[in-house]
Structures are given as C-alpha cells and as structure tokens.
C-alpha cells in the first residue's frame, strides 16, 4: 500500500513538474484546440504541447509535420504540406484543400510535440473558481496531508520502537538482578539466624563466667569501705575522748 501511494505521488509530482516547465519555459507552450480542422489526429477539446523548431524533441521542419503559427492574431495548428525556403504551405487534416495563404517561418510559434485528449476542456474548467479549487487547491491539500500523515506515522513508529527496546532491555536485565538477590538472600538469613540462636548461649556463658568474679570484686570493695569507715570512726572517737579528758583535767585544776 505504501509503495502504491508513493508511486502515485511520484507520478503526480512529475506531471506537475512537466506542466510547470512547459508553462514557464519561453520555448514551450500548451494550447486548447477549439475547432475540428485537424480531426481525427487532433480533436476539438484536446490540449496540444508545442516546442521550438529544430529543438530537443523536434527535428528539422519537413512536410507532414504539424505546426502552430500566428495569423491575424489567431493561433492555427495545421499540417505542413510544403516548405519553400522560409515560406510554408499548410492544410487542415479535415479540410479537402490546402489553406489559401502561405505562412512565413517567422510566424511559426512552435512544432507540435504531443496532445492530451480532452485536456483543453480541463484547462478551460481550471480557469473557473470551482475548477481551480477542485483541480489545484484540493489535490494540493490532500497531497500535503498525506505526506504530513506519513511523517507523523514514521515519528510515532520511531518512538514506539525506542520504547519497546527500552522495555525489552529492562525485562532482560530484571531476572538477573532478581536471581542474584534470591541466591544471596538465604545465606544472609541463615547467618543471622545462627547468630540469633548462638547469642543467648554466649550471653549466658559470659554471665556465668563473669558473675562470680564481679561478686568477689564487689565484696572486696565493700569490705574495704567498711574497714575505712571503722578506722575513721575509731580515730574520731579516740580524738573526741582525748579532747574531753583534757577539758576535764583543766576543769579540776581550776577548782
């Protein structure tokens, strides 16, 4: 479907380019046929395209070729019957006799190249407002819309591809992390459980070993404190007794 669409677009683009070249080139021209003087080769309503004499698409002018020339400010397209120097004798295919006039080579505007059947009717229709809209404006809008839509779809496809690649990468990396954590987690749990089980026994053992020692130290400290208190009390008591004795002796001496 995409190949067909782009093929149609390419054909349209080529046709438009060809018409633009003919329209803007001074050596090429398009004309609408308004009479049946060249019937059946060229019919009324056809569009003909002409080029320069001895040009790229036309050779040396000879009898039998079709030319377009100007006579009395009108364009006439007839077949060449004879060439006499710079003078031509022409005749319409639908006419029984040749034209009653001769044509100067300088009056020839172009040599016939090809025709577009009924293209003249289309050209006349395009000259109207409705024809201009239907034949030029509307197709141009559709063409731009199709191209824009294809561009938008391509951008969406690129973004979707990047998102899918990112998601696939995350999915591919996630199991590695999960398995690694699953393998390492039980070892840590067992270690912690072992420590939790052994902790009370160690604590009990330490309490059993250290409690008597702490008790002995505490008893020793208490005994030392009691001895110090006793010594201090005895010393104070002795000093108080000696002080009372001295005071009593002084009192007796005074008496």
Image: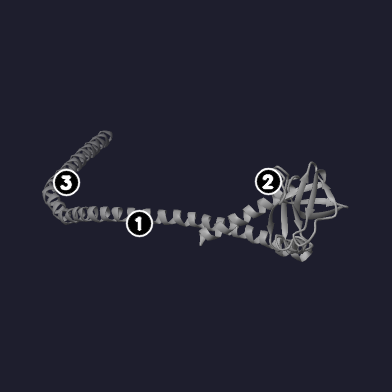
- In front: label 1 or label 3: 1
Asked which secondary structure carries label 3, the reply is helix
Callout 2: 10 Å neighbours few (<14), some, many (20+)? some
Residue under numbered circle 3: 218
If you read the primary sequence from the N terminus, does the residue marked by circle 1 or circle 2 appear first? 2
Q: Is residue 200 left or right of residue 243?
A: left
Image quarter where the C terminus lies is: top left
Q: Which residue is mark 2?
A: 58
Comparing 116 with 40, the one in front is 40
- Mark 1 touching mark 3, by CB under 8 A? no
**Which residue is disc 1 drawn over?**
171
Is 84 positioned to the left or the right of 213 in the image?
A: right
Lower sequence index among marks 1 and 3: 1
Query: Looking at the image, what colour scheme do you see?
Result: one colour
Residue appearing at x 18%, y 39% in the figure: 231
Q: Is residue 238 above or below residue 118?
A: above
């Amino acid at each position: 479907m995409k190949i067909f669409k782009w093929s149609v677009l390419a054909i349209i683009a080529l046709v438009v380019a060809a018409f633009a070249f003919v329209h803007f080139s001074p050596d090429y021209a398009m004309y609408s046929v308004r009479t049946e003087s060249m019937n059946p080769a060229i019919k009324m309503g056809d569009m003909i395209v002409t080029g320069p004499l001895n040009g790229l698409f036309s050779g040396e002018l000879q009898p039998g070729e079709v030319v377009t020339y100007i006579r009395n400010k009108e364009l006439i397209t007839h077949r060449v019957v004879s060439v006499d120097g710079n003078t031509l004798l022409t005749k319409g295919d639908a006419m029984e006799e040749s034209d009653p006039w001769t044509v100067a080579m300088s009056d020839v505007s172009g040599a016939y190249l090809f025709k577009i059947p009924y293209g003249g009717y289309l050209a006349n229709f395009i000259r109207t407002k409705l024809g201009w809209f239907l034949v030029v404006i509307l197709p141009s809008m559709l063409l731009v819309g199709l191209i824009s839509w294809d561009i938008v779809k391509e951008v969406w496809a690129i973004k979707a591809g990047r998102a899918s690649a990112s998601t696939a990468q995350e999915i591919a990396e996630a199991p590695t992390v999960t398995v690694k954590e699953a393998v390492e987690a039980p070892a840590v749990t067992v270690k912690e459980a072992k420590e939790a089980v052994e902790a009370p026994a160690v604590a009990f053992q330490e309490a059993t070993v250290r409690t008597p020692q702490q008790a002995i130290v505490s008893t020793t400290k208490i005994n030392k404190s009691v001895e110090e208190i006793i010594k201090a009390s005895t010393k104070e008591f002795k000093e108080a007794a000696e002080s009372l004795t001295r005071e009593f002796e002084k009192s007796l001496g005074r008496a």
